[in-house]
Amino acid sequence: MQQTYELRPITEDEFPAWARAIANSNGEDLTDAQLADERAVIELDRTIGAFDDGEPVGGAAAYTRRLAVPGASLPVAGVTWVGVAPTHRRQGILTAMMRMQLADVHERGVEPIAALRPSEAAIYGRYGYGPASRGGQLRGEKRSMAFRPGTDFGSGTIRLVACDRARPQLERVYEQLWSGAVGWPDRAQRFWTSRLRDEPHNRGGGTALRCAVHVEGDGTASGYALYRVRDERDALGGASSTVQVVELATVPGPAYAALWRFLAGIDLVRWIDCEAAADEPLAHLLTEPRAVRSSEVDRLWVRLVDVGPALAGRRYATPLDVVLEVDDEFCPWNAGRFRLQASDDAVSCERTTDPADLLLSVAELGAVFLGGTTLASLEAAGLVRELRPGALTRATTAFRGDREPFYPGGAAFPEF
């Protein structure tokens, strides 16, 4: 008979042991300084601890955020700090925690979606999450990164500024961008503090964090790049340093090209690394597009906690009237048929008894929710069934976004 474990939110005193247990489950150690960093952003009332005889053996947590979705932004439960001790795996603890977490989000009635960045892609599909965005570690060879003649670099200037001094400018740029950049979360003060915290244990073998700010002639910041330089050696002992771009954000205009030209001009380095969107435009600026390459993998996974409010909360590329039959064994309140109607900014999604046009699971809805993955590709994989001719093509077009969604957290900064 499978043993049951106590599941509940953790207390302040339990946080260090809980955090270290989860870190250990992922093969990591936490220093006291790292514990303090993490405690500054965690929400204790949104944690789950799994306890065996009073000792934490697993956990999960959620951040209260908003996420940019096509045409809007929605409250999102940013799932984080998930792990089970190696001594207690395959005993149903993770499933119990995921069930408890999603039920709590549903009962709160505020966040119609949850999102996470999984360490292992095979884990979360069974809980109704779908891979909603792609990205990759872009690597550019600096000596081959020549920009095309006529590239508009604008008339702005770039200055290196201490991160704490630059923070107000960074916040203003990010605030201008995030709600229109599908896949980006809002960033409250505690997350900015976490993003810019630059203790040696956060540097991954690189230098202290550098901050390059692009400023227009009127003094307004129009972009920034956060980066480190990592010293490496090749097989013959020669220098092969890398610029590790932690985050790059620009308003529309020449600041994007100007900041990339700045990064490609840093002396004594060979490579530039950056986690980038699946449709990152950098290659289009170069005379040799193959100077930058990227291996794409799944990034942000999305889970519709409440199908109706979630689908009604985003916007669609074309008018749509479709009946979706949704399968959701893990969260049965979502199972059934929904009529999704969209015309410009008027969107509704209500339960119906009308015949279904498309049959799919809630995980497939999560995969297409941000406008990247398409319903047509999922149908080709046998994961979506078209029940009314033409419904698949119309729904695929309506769900699609203008750009590939991208989550800018980066592997070194897993916000959720």
Image: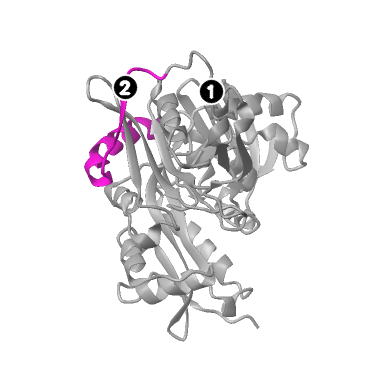
Within-10-Å neighbours for mark 1: few <14, some 14–19, many 20+: some
Disc 2 from disc 1: Cα separation = 18 Å
Identify the disc placed on residue 156: 2
- For the stretch drawn in magenta, what is the main secondary structure? helix
Local secondary structure at mark 1 = helix
In the image, residue 397 lies at what x, y percent? 63, 24
The residue sitting at 49% across, 57% down in the picture is: 102
The residue sitting at 39% across, 69% down in the picture is: 9
The quadrant where residue 224 appears? top left
Whether 175 is among the magenta residues is yes
Relative horizontal placement of residue 122, taking residue 38 as reference (left or right): right
Count of marks overlaid on the render: 2
Q: Tell which circle, 2 or 1, labels the residue nearer the N-terminal end.
A: 2
In the image, residue 190 lies at what x, y percent? 29, 52
Q: Is residue 385 visible?
A: no
The quadrant where residue 160 appears? top left
The residue sitting at 22% across, 42% down in the picture is: 165
Q: Residue furthest top?
A: 150
Q: Please give the residue where the numbered disc 1 appears in the rendered image.
A: 285
> Quadrant of the image for the N terminus?
bottom right
Mark 1 residue type: Leu
Q: Which residues are magenta?
A: 153-180
In the image, residue 227 lies at what x, y percent? 40, 44
Local secondary structure at mark 2 = loop
Say if 103 sits above or below 337 in the image.
below
Relative horizontal placement of residue 371, taking residue 193 as reference (left or right): right
Relative horizontal placement of residue 302, taking residue 388 as reference (left or right): left
Mark 2 residue type: Gly
Whether 60 is among the magenta residues is no
Say if 161 sits above or below 14 in the image.
above
Q: Nearer the viewer, residue 255 or 105?
A: 255
